[in-house]
Image (spheres, coloured by chain):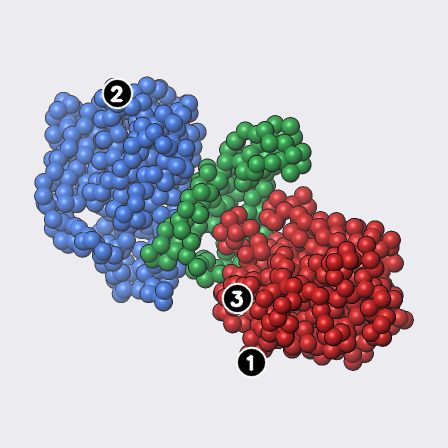
Chain colours: A green, B red, C blue
Amino acid sequence: MTMFSSRNWREYQHRYRLEASKFKKSGKTYFPKRTVDPETGDTEQEIVKLPDEGKIVTYTVIRVAPSKFADMAPYALAIAELTDGTRLMAQVTDCDVEQVKIGMDVRVEFRRIQDEGHHGVLSYGYKFVPKWF
Amino acid sequence: MRDVCIVGVGMSKWGEVWRKSMRELHTDAALAAIKNAGVDHLDGLYVGCMSGGLFVGQEHLGAILSDYMGMRGLPAMRVESACASGGMAVRAAYIDVASGMSDIVMASGVEKMTDVSGDDATYALATAADQEYEVFHGATFPGLYAMMAHAHMAKYGTTREMLSMVAVKNHRNGARNPSAQYPFEITAEGVAKSVLIADPLHILDCSPITDGAAAVIVTTVDVAKKLGKPYIKITGSAVGTDTIALAQREDMTTIKAATIATQKALKAADKKIDDVNFAEVHDCFTIAEIVVAESIGKYEPGKAGQAILACDTSLEGRFPMNPSGGLKSKGHPVGATGVAQVVEVYKQLTGQAENGRQIPNNPKVGMTQNMGGSGASSVVHIMEVA
Amino acid sequence: MAGIVGYGAHLPRHRIKVEEIAKVWGADAPSYKKGLMLREKSVPPPDMDTITLSVEASKRALARAEMVDPADIGAIYIGSESHPYAVKPSGTVVAEAIGATPHIHCADFEFACKAGSEAMYVALSHVEAKQMKYALAIAADTSQGAPSDALEFSAAAGAGAFIMGTDNLIAECLDTHSYMTDTPDFWRREHQFYPQHGGRFTGEEAYFAHTLGASKALLGKAGMKAKDFAYATFHQPNGKFPQKVAFMLGFTQEQIDPGWLAPTLGNTYSGASPIGLTATLDVAKPGDLIFMCSYGSGAGSDAFIWKVTDRINEVRDKAVHTRKLLSENVIYVDYGTYAKYRRKIRKND
């Protein structure tokens, strides 16, 4: 199924700039943005930019991949906790999948995530890379 | 609120059923349940189906399925909560009967999954995850449960062998279930040596792609008594939800939605988890059974793996889990799974489980735990002998 | 005077060795290594392209520019011959990613390997003319050489980004000179996947004539000689050409060394001399003069004289050094992986 590029475009604030909601009352940050703080019901918030470094809290190696990602397989997919405590899921790229483990330090990098074949729109966003400098 | 019971059950053939369409599979299960209960009419139908649209391009299931089972005009609707759709259909029927709105209602579930390629099936199933923040990045369902597995292993020392023994146990039970898609036994070594899908999960840690349907007749005690058929009572029905995205869970090693649903259902039934004699749980992946066994409160966090190794959850154990063979061996036509769990509990509580699959010593209380996605929704039913 | 306020580079971690390519095509690896001074080249993985390289290089430029608010960037120009889209700008993606939209001017430049210095030239002109506070110039490519073609041994990937402004400079631009003629030494027609080139015609009448033309004119205009400079960096289609042209102009190996990246990076096309400049700035001292000259087929050269300021010492370590990206933690790939990464294998859609 081909979706209009509007669907991805709407998410640029998150995918390109890691913008998140930080609620006034609880001080909690949610990624992606939300209207209501699920803990307090608070709607007063400010937009913050997430830090670009963190640690892997869990991961897997996808060996049987959806066709859109088949050329990348096997690829590591992880949830990392960023330095502000926010968690997000992304691929871990630029590394041997066997090296990925819980506790590994990663950095967020801007990468191409998927494309609609040779003709469709390109989707960009964040991936993790091992932090080596 | 009236007392609610189940008076008859039915299953279609499960597996890669090339010769049957979705409507035929559903009709087979529905007519089997009607015959089994001996009812002459229905007041309503709730059909659980995750994605008729993506699997066979068919929505509007209430109308088409009631027509094809010979009941044009029946009040019918489809219920959806991803892989928990079947359990939710049972709950919808329960509410309908308990409220006094209807007396005899069918809860059914169906999924026809083999009319699309494996890639399309993966896509359809992945719609139960967060499309924008999980699937967009290349997540698959085995991948999401694999991440839960790695987190559980790191936190509690859960082992490869524990995962494997879930599959071994469920296949041992499923081998005695005439409805099972894969009714054969497997070994722990076989699981560990099977192909890796998403580390640490191998193909034999995963439930299969299945065509199938299941149906149960939900009614009042009065009707059940008049029918003169074996019946069981639903004494607790509850639902819990949680974040759809795994990354946003408070704790990735537990399924909070299952904890919420179980606690509510037990409270409604005025029972404690240790009063429950056995459970049909949502073992879409081996790790899921371990996590669920802890989330429902039967085992302390991190202790379910040991219990499985100690055969505590085997058919002859203190708390048999998935006597039907579970999703793992019986198959997992996603929308039908939650209903089929109730079918198994009905059989066990009425002493009708086939081929030596009957849990010994006349169990009195059984439960089902059905969940959607990576555990963002869960529905639990407590059932008791009448 | 206008100049550089922040700079940054980004390179893929993957590399392929000349021997690995030569093995597949029966080519003589030693002649490429000795004759063209190429040992290995960078390979972009499938999730990296001109846009992603540009974004990361720009973030590093922003880190070194310190107090620059992305909203104050008035223009983003990306010079590349490998923009991912034939129609749809690369610059807007970068602008969106660094938070510089919507009050901004974007344009994608193309002039073979000279597109990056072109972006730098235009960005400098804008800030010099006080049309905007800052302008971001990016030089990036993920170039493709046809399989078995000589270009396949060198076509590489990388990006350099420069925030131009008029205050808080790291390096002031003292003067520039451009030199162009219509010389068809290398081209790629619309819808063609790989470029074509004029073989040895790309040398004397193309690379050398234009590089020398621009460089000599600029040195003459500025009244300077090679020995006045601490460093120099040139377009580097291979290791040999920039070294040869440097010597012809009177520069020494020591002067070109910091920015002479091609032997282990390959030809990053639009990125070549700009990335060379980032590596040179990484080691430059306040007061140093840096000579830079690009070359783009078709053909032309842009030459610049940069004077490094005191601020270099404060910002140098605010982002990773280019040499570190070039030489540490590299991942070597075989030809099959390289062919897959560069989409050289025909598959069913």
| Amino acid type indicated by mark 2 | Lys
Q: Would you call the spot at circle 1 few (<14 residues within 10 Å), some (14-19), or many (20 or more)?
A: few
State which mark lies toward you, 1 or 3. Answer: 3
State which mark lies toward you, 2 or 1. Answer: 1
Q: How many marks?
A: 3
Label 2 in the same subunit as label 1: no
Q: Quadrant of the C terminus of chain C?
A: bottom left
Q: Farthest residue in the front direction?
A: B73
Kindly check if marks 1 and 3 are in contact, taking CB atoms under 8 A apart as contact: no
The picture places residue C152, in percent across and down from the top left corner, at 27, 55
Residue identifier under label 3: B58
Q: Which residue is rendered at x = 25% and y = 56% of the image?
A: C193
Q: Which residue is rendered at x = 53% and y = 42% of the image?
A: A106
Q: Would you call the spot at circle 2 few (<14 residues within 10 Å), some (14-19), or many (20 or more)?
A: few
Q: Which mark is residue C130?
A: 2
**Inter-mark Cα distance, 1 to 3:** 17 Å
Residue B219, compared with residue C226, is above or below; it is: below
Q: Which residue is rendered at x = 32% and y = 19% of the image?
A: C167
Query: Residue B384 vs residue A13: left or right?
Result: right
Label 1 in the same subunit as label 3: yes
Q: Is residue B86 visible?
A: no
The picture places residue B78, in percent across and down from the top left corner, at 62, 61
Name the one closer to the observer, B220 or C257.
Answer: B220
Q: Which mark is residue B19?
A: 1
Query: Residue C339 vs residue B35: left or right?
Result: left
Q: Would you call the spot at circle 3 few (<14 residues within 10 Å), some (14-19), or many (20 or more)?
A: few
The picture places residue C10, in percent across and down from the top left corner, at 38, 40
